[in-house]
Amino acid sequence: MKKCVIVGGADINNYEYIKTLISKDDYIIYCDSGLKHMDKLGLKPSLIVGDFDSHDNPHMDVETIVLPVVKDDTDTVYAAKEGVKRGFEDFVLIGVIGGRLDHSLANVSILLYLRANGRRAQIIDDYSVMKIVGQKTEYIPDKYSYFSLVNITGKAEGITIKNAKYEIQNAVITTDYQYGVSNEITPGKVAEVSVSDGELLLIMVR
């Protein structure tokens, strides 16, 4: 099944890299100012959502959901919920990490929302790929220069890292002591990460 790609309004510098990860057959949701990326991505929207406080409504011949300015969900959160409602299993979020730290952190939490709803999801920016890792082992190829594990849920125990410069077994990472930053994959190996109880944000840096 084609994946749901959600495009936010944060800066994208390496369009050529991002385009290699998206198919024209994917379901593309542009969120408000994410529309500024449409021409450079060369991808027609399948759906447009937004309150249009940061970008004009283009009034295209495309399904458009106009949201109220005063609401609980951000445009990006609404788009994720809409993708779940429409039955997509795989999600890629781009243009959601940038200068606004508040929006960036809120967008990272969308990965938790999608995982809680049984979906597979990742955030991709110019430098990294982010996803949630839990009980299922995550394999990290050595095409990534570094990887970090960050506790954003408050509970992460029984953490194991194999085939990396810094290996641990049955460890704990807490929100007030984030020591799982900037690890390196053993050359020629595939790193393995798992969490027996809880979840971690995995950031793989190109």
Image (cartoon, rainbow, N blue to C red):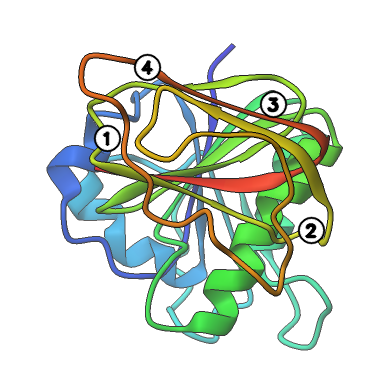
> At label 2, which amino acid type do we have?
Thr
Residue annotated with mark 4: 190
User: For mark 2, does the 10 Å Cα neighbourhood hold few (<14), some (14 to 19), or many (20 or more) residues?
Assistant: some
Q: CA distance from mark 3 to mark 4?
A: 29 Å
Helix, strand or loop for disc 1: loop
Helix, strand or loop for disc 3: loop
Task: Work out whether 110 lies above or below 119.
Answer: below
Q: CA distance from mark 4 to mark 2?
A: 26 Å
Residue annotated with mark 3: 88
Task: Work out whether 155 lies above or below 162.
Answer: below
In front: 202, or 5?
202
Q: CA distance from mark 1 to mark 3?
A: 27 Å
> In the image, which disc is placed on residue 144?
1
Residue annotated with mark 2: 153
Q: CA distance from mark 4 to mark 1?
A: 10 Å
Q: Are marks 4 and 1 in contact (CB under 8 Å)?
A: no
For the residues carrying marks 2 and 3, which lies nearer the camera in this image? 2
Residue 186 appears left or right of 154:
left
Identified at 69% across, 26% down, the residue is 88
Sequence order check, earlier mark of 4 and 2: 2
Identified at 79% across, 88% down, the residue is 70
Q: Position of residue 86 (x, y in %)?
A: 76, 31
In front: 14, or 71?
14
